[in-house]
Image (tube, rainbow, N blue to C red):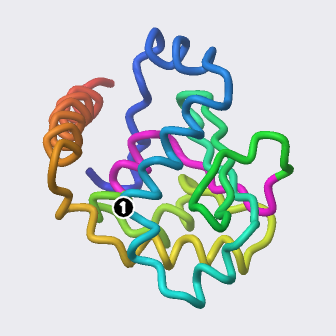
Amino acid sequence: MNSAQPAPLLPARLAGLVSRLPQWPPSAVLCAGLNLLFLPTLDKDTKQRLMNRTVAIQVSDAGLDCRISLTSIGFLPALRSAPEVTIRACAWDFYRLARRIEDPDTLFFSRRLAIEGDTELGLLVKNALDAIDWTRLTGRLGPAIDRLRRLAEGRGARHKSSP
C-alpha cells in the first residue's frame, strides 16, 4: 500500500462500538501490552526519561484516547492526567507502524501520523517503539496479531479496489 493513498478505516459499526467504550478498558489493555512487550526492552535512561510522563495514544478512526504513564510498577492508565504528548493515527497506520511496513517519518510528513505537545517526549516514545521487533511476538499474542494482520490486509485490499 502506497502511503499517498488514504488508509482504510475501521468498519463504521466496529468504530461506533469501540468509540463508546470508557477510556479505562483500552488504556488498561494498552498498558498490559506495553508492560509485556515494551517495558523489558527499555534501557534505564529511557525509563527515567519516561517516568511519570503522560502520553496519549489516539486511534482516530476508532475514537480511542488511551492515556498512559510509566510508574515504578510499570505502565498504568493515566485517565485523569492531561497528556504531555499525543500521538494520533488511524488503526491501519498504527498496525503498519508496528509491523514495520510503514516508516513513521513517512506517515508524519504525509500527515497520517500526528505528534502534538512535547516534541522531545514524542520523539523519545517513537524511538523507543521503533526499537521493538514486533514481528517476533511469541506465545498467544503472536497468533492473535497474525489474525488481525490477515483481517486488516483483506480490508486494505478491498479498500484499494474501491473507488
Which corner quadrant of the image does residue 83 belong to? bottom right
Residue positioned most to the front: 73
Where in the figure is residue 63, as x and y percent of width and height? 62, 28
Give the magenta range. Answer: 83-96
Give me the residue at 23% from left, 43% from top: 145
Residue 146 at x, y = what percent?
Answer: 16, 42
| Residue at 17% over, 48% down | 142
Residue 65 located left or right of residue 9: right
Q: Is residue 31 magenta?
A: no
Q: Position of residue 157 (x, y in %)?
A: 19, 34
Asked if residue 84 is among those painted magenta in the image, a careful observer would answer: yes
Say which amino acid is labelled 1: Leu
Residue pictured at 80% horizontal, 62% vertical: 84
Q: Measuring 70% from the left and 72% from the top, which residue is drawn there?
A: 51
Residue 104: x and y, percent? 46, 68
Badge 1 element: helix
Q: Is residue 36 left or right of residue 76?
A: left
In this rendering, the answer to whether 135 lies above or below 140 is below
Look at the picture and state if 85 lies above or below 42.
above
Q: Is residue 77 above or below residue 24?
A: below
- Foreground pick, 31 / 131: 31
- Count every numbered label the image shows and give the total: 1
Task: Determine which residue is flagged by label 1.
Answer: 37
For residue 50, side relative to residue 62 (left or right): right
Q: Is residue 127 above or below residue 28?
A: below
Which residue is the extreme one toward the bottom?
45
